[in-house]
Image: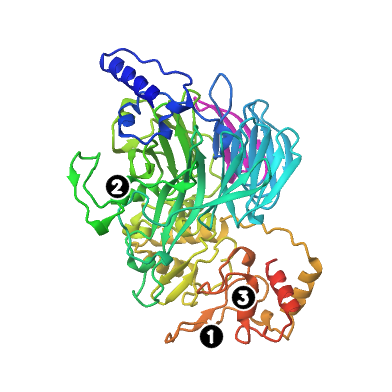
Amino acid sequence: MRQLALAASFLAVTASAGIPVPLPQRIPAELDLREVDAASARDVVKRLAVPAAASWLSGSSIARIAGPTTLLAVADTENHAVVVVDGAGTVRHTVPVGQRPERLVAGPDGRVFVACRGDRTLVIVDPHRGAVARRAVVGAEPYAVALTPDGATVLVTASAEGVLVALDATNLAERFRVTLGAWPAAIAVHPDGQHAFVTHLLSGTVEAVSLTKGEVAYSLELPTRGTGFPRTAQAADDARAAVHATAALVSPGGTRLFVAHVMADVGATETTIVAQGYGLGVARPLVATVSTFDLTTKTLLRSPVAERGVKIETLRDKKFRTLEEDAAPFGFIEEEELARLSQPVALAMDPVFARLLLVSMGSDRVTALDAGAADPIGRPLQGVKVGHAPRGVALSADGRTAFVHNAQGFSISRIDLAASAFQEEFRFDLKAEDTFAVAKDPLSAEAALGRRLFTYALDERVGGVAHFACAGCHPDGRHDGLVWRVGEGPRQTPILAGRLEGTGPYNWLGTELHLEENVTETIGRLGGGGLDPKETKALATYITHHLPGLDRPAQAERARVVRGRALFESAETGCSNCHSGDHGDAVRHEVGTGAKGDTKTAFDTPSLRHLWASAPYLHDGSATTLAQLVELCGDTMGRTKQLTAADKAALAAYLATM
């Protein structure tokens, strides 16, 4: 700390005297302001350069390729290609790599490693030749990718299989495979190369994987409330969940782990508190945040003001406000700013000005946070509007420029992090200096409009003042794994992708014969003002025909699956009487799962497509596994009560193939 004080004093004096301050290329890790939580440090947070971590320790949809000139690689998911583009916006190569490249990293030798979600492969691209150099099959739905600090090992999550796969970065030979929780998402490798931290799409668990032992060493749990925000709900703790943890980053000094995720308030356990709406009328049931862990103590860091109901100074207006004791937590971020954080998807560390950059897909924003704070999400500095649906960010070699990949804009926005406008505190109306196209949208104008309406959270005609977006609960058309408490009772979030065409009537009660009508009804539940008929049709078209499907993992026990299918199709169980093929019978049935006193106990027969991925099951989520679902069927949904344990297991195994 003494070195820090001396450095800060020197820089402060020279800067005030108008003397140019050279930014060192690298300084000792103990001077890394991102590892410091001290008020005195904030005075120099904009003047002191800090060591930048290797950019390949976590993946994004865009990466800077090592070399003397700025060269970027972009994962163009919808065109199934990697685009190589220079810093001026000139496309050098467009490389077909496989179905739905999700994320990538550029290693220290310049090679680009790409996780292709749609065809189970990890691909190495030579960006200078514009060609695929090598590929390997790694498992169902590769999602995140990262390299170890030395660039020798590449890590990739086969998300549909719940595993982390480690491969030799030269020949892609498998080194080890670790079984994790369901749907692993982001990977963040520690700078010392000892551990990789893996987050999850449908839970708040972060698993620390030992890279030397090839096993899970320990776990961390993301918070469900109180990370630098005003109180946005009054529901009980059991009504909250942490989900969609799609971005993670370890600080260069290795003492902090940042995780971008969503905190959901699904409402209290009672089913009749409100007549309609999600989250019991809570103003903002979905809140995006960045949680920060101290990796030395393996504990969640909290802002001091979030722990005390005392006077705090807001940096926005330099005035004091008094908080009631029961009003904590409250950080420095304001209620109206929460919407700008919607659907967090990527993180990066600004190595010059010690700021954490958060990319929010649902609001077309990049938010800069004070990385020196104990709880950075409570200390926003700037907010920058970029292109449509940003999904990734990469920094220039000198750390002064951020390149943001706009997935639905098929473009890159360039942000000058050193510009005077970006240095002003608490500016949320900034715009990226320039944006340049890197590809063409493959969708029709109608489908593209529907995609925009599905994703963008700031359109109050869809999500109202709570700034819901369809993608908030259905990212990529999938689901959040949650059960929402609404007026008619608990409702499990269904998967949309690949399940809507020809499956009317729609919603759990089967009240709408046409999808457009159901879209209108759902928007009403979200509190939205409503769309015109053309927009409603565009949204229905997009979710019916253009959401990417899921890649089911291979089934190992074929004999059991064959037996399960025979049972499913038999008169003994009667399952296929209502569930024929991928579709239901379009009839409502009373199956005994309605709430007590609820007269609406008849439910629409849902499609079983992607059943393996859609837990929890039934309208109220009362079955958490397929085995439980088979047990609950009993004599009300088909007839399974009489089956032996082996036959029930076989039936569940067959359902897992659907």
Q: Quadrant of residue 146?
A: top right
Cα distance in 3D space between marks 1 and 2: 49 Å
Nearest-to-viewer mark from 1 and 2:
2
Q: Which amino acid, mark 3?
A: Leu
Depth order, front residue of 113/73: 113
Q: Which residue is mark 1?
A: 592
Secondary structure category for the residue under label 2: helix
Nearest-to-viewer mark from 3 and 2:
2
Q: Which amino acid, mark 2?
A: Val
Depth order, front residue of 198/564: 198
Q: Of marks 3 and 2, which one's residue comes earlier in the chain?
A: 2
Q: Which residue is mark 3?
A: 629
Magenta stretch holds residue 97: yes
Magenta stretch holds residue 436: no
Q: Residue at 18% x, 44% y: name it.
A: 320
Q: Of marks 1 and 2, which one's residue comes earlier in the chain?
A: 2
Q: Quadrant of the C terminus?
A: bottom right
Q: Which residue is mark 2?
A: 305
Outermost front residue: 2
Q: Which amino acid, mark 1?
A: Gly
Taking the image as shown, residue 270 lies to the left or right of residue 127, namely: left
Q: Of marks 3 and 1, which one's residue comes earlier in the chain?
A: 1
Q: Are marks 3 and 2 in contact (CB under 8 Å)?
A: no
Q: Which numbered dot is residue 242?
A: none
Q: Position of residue 301 (x, y in %)?
A: 41, 46
Name the image colouring: rainbow
Depth order, front residue of 616/562: 616
Task: Please provide the residue range marked out in magenta.
Answer: 75-98
